[in-house]
Amino acid sequence: MANFNNLNRFLDSLDKDFLHGVVPHIIAEKATEFYKNRFTVKADVKNKAWPPAKNPPRRGSLMVRSGNLVASIRPSVVSGERVVISAGSARVPYAQIHNEGGPIRVPVTRNMRKFAWAMNYKSGDNRWKQLAITRKSILRINIPKRQFMGHSKILDQLIINSINKAFKNFKNSIK
């Protein structure tokens, strides 16, 4: 929680009605927009570029094939005390592994072997043959970390600027 000290001090200095009524919605909107934008800039929350794909896609973007992952980023709790932005759902169970990185286990199925043989004949790439003839029943694949959600000083500053602007408008509307 030490990362949020400056933001918390700033929020404590605001009017309580404004703080509990308007600020949570500003935070939710800015955070959701910022996290979704990570897919456009292809960089993590600290603006460090994501690691490149081993096999870049022929078209489209690596992390945006169907758009389901980006669409799953949404505010799940917005209250005067707490704002929670979440990603993933039953349709998007891979959100956490892409954000945090790490190993996954994939079962080797008969259809996977058939596909590997077809790709071996089509491309002549020996890696496909190795997959087709493997004796393993489970493959362990390491997914690189491509963080799109998490604490960000950039996001903190965007939120502070937006709240300042909204607070000035709020004070002017009261007068």
Image (tube, rainbow, N blue to C red):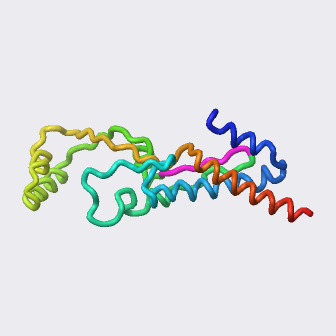
Residue 134 x/y as whole percent:
12, 41
Q: Is residue 68 left or right of residue 4?
A: left
Residue at the image point whose x is 69% and y is 51% from the top: 160
Which quadrant would the C terminus be assigned to in this image? bottom right
Residue 150 x/y as whole percent:
53, 44
Q: Is residue 84 magenta?
A: yes
Q: Is residue 54 magenta?
A: no
Q: Is residue 93 left or right of residue 34?
A: left
Q: Is residue 56 left or right of residue 93?
A: left
Which quadrant would the N terminus be assigned to in this image? top right
Residue at the image point whose x is 69% and y is 57% from the top: 162
Residue at the image point whose x is 69% and y is 43% from the top: 7
Q: Is residue 151 left or right of residue 92?
A: right
Q: Residues in magenta?
A: 81-88
Residue at the image point whose x is 57% and y is 59% from the top: 33
Residue 137 x/y as whole percent:
19, 39
**Which residue occupies the foreground of this view, 126 or 42?**
42
**Which residue occupies the foreground of this view, 82 or 91?**
82
